[in-house]
Amino acid sequence: MTRTSVRIGLIGTGRIGQVHAAAIAANPHAELTGVADVFVDGARATAARFGGIATDNAEELIASGQLDAVLIASPTPTHVDLISASVEAGLPVLCEKPIDLDINRVDALLPKVRAAGVPVALGFNRRFDPAFAAVRARVAAGEIGSLEQLIIISRDPAAPPADYVGVSGGIFRDMTIHDFDMARFFLPDIVEVSATGSQLFDDGARAHGDFDTAVTTLRSSCGAIVSITNSRHSAVGYDQRLEAFGATGMLQVANAPTSLVSLSTAAAVEAKPPYQDFFLERYAEAYAAELDAFIALVRGEKSDSPTYEDGRAALLLADAAQRSATGGGTVAVDLGFSAVAGAA
């Protein structure tokens, strides 16, 4: 490691923690200095594989004086307290979404985050997907004229375990929240939310009063419409598509295949292999670019990292969608600001 490497402490070593640990280890400008998990065996295994010291005490790691930044990948209920401890220690934070399931806790922490003057970034990695980022840049450049409609399709290959559904906060706060942030990446000032959901196939969703299928419509202050389609299963693989429709044209992002090879025979023409299986493959480049942006943020350089306020806005939209889907009707929202990180 060079002396200019950003020393990062990772908190949480579950599936997403492993993604971040690998990204830090692969980045020439980062060093995994410490790994914390209450299940210390997970911390030890991660540190042995990717570097750093292991501990079961996240607060001690934050206060160690050995870090330049903190990456929080622990369970959602821990996020607020860990962000608070990190900014108190003067350490920039990259925290996985959502900040919390309760908007009141998010709002209670906001003044402290702002007063600390320490950067807090949210893990909305899809902004950094090369294809989505390219479409957003081309829309901003006026290539298709004024944006009128944005269509986002996001379907997971299989539903999560029922126990996870019970603590996830529901499909809108757990899954659609990524799509809400993507909507704001293009149209920051959303003013109305309308959503509907169904329980079609997942016993976990039924048991916990959640939805396994949902469609959400958002309206921006300029009148442009966003349509978000979600499902907790997809027989064709991880379904991640986007369409931006404007006054003079349209830009589309298709699903990522596992291979570019196709087969044509007497029985079928251009038969193709399946789409990529899950987010680990589909968004590998996005996670690497997200870390690059965070490192720039830590160094005080120009960065497109989503902010704490962006995380708050996405949760407000998720809460509004939940109210709409369970109570019916359109819900007006006031996100409190119209700026989005990186917006021109």
Image (cartoon, rainbow, N blue to C red):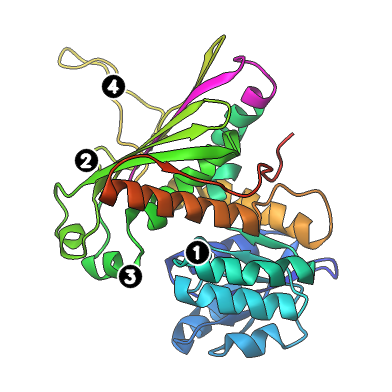
Image: 164 above or below 63: above
Q: Earlier in the sequence, mark 4 or mark 3?
A: 3
**Secondary structure state at the residue bearing disc 2:** loop
Residue drawn 17% across the image and 50% down it? 199
Image: 273 above or below 337: above
Of marks 2 and 1, the one in the foreground: 1
- What residue does disc 2 label? 235
Amino acid type at image mark 2: Ala
Left or right: residue 114 versus residue 325 is right
Amino acid type at image mark 1: Ile
Residue 103: mark: 1
Residue 57: mark: none
Q: Which residues are magenta?
A: 138-157
Residue drawn 39% across the image and 57% down it? 174
Q: Kindly report the distance in space between the C-alpha atoms of the residues bearing marks 4 and 1.
A: 51 Å
**Secondary structure state at the residue bearing disc 1:** helix
Image: 48 above or below 95: below
Amino acid type at image mark 4: Leu
**Secondary structure state at the residue bearing disc 4:** loop
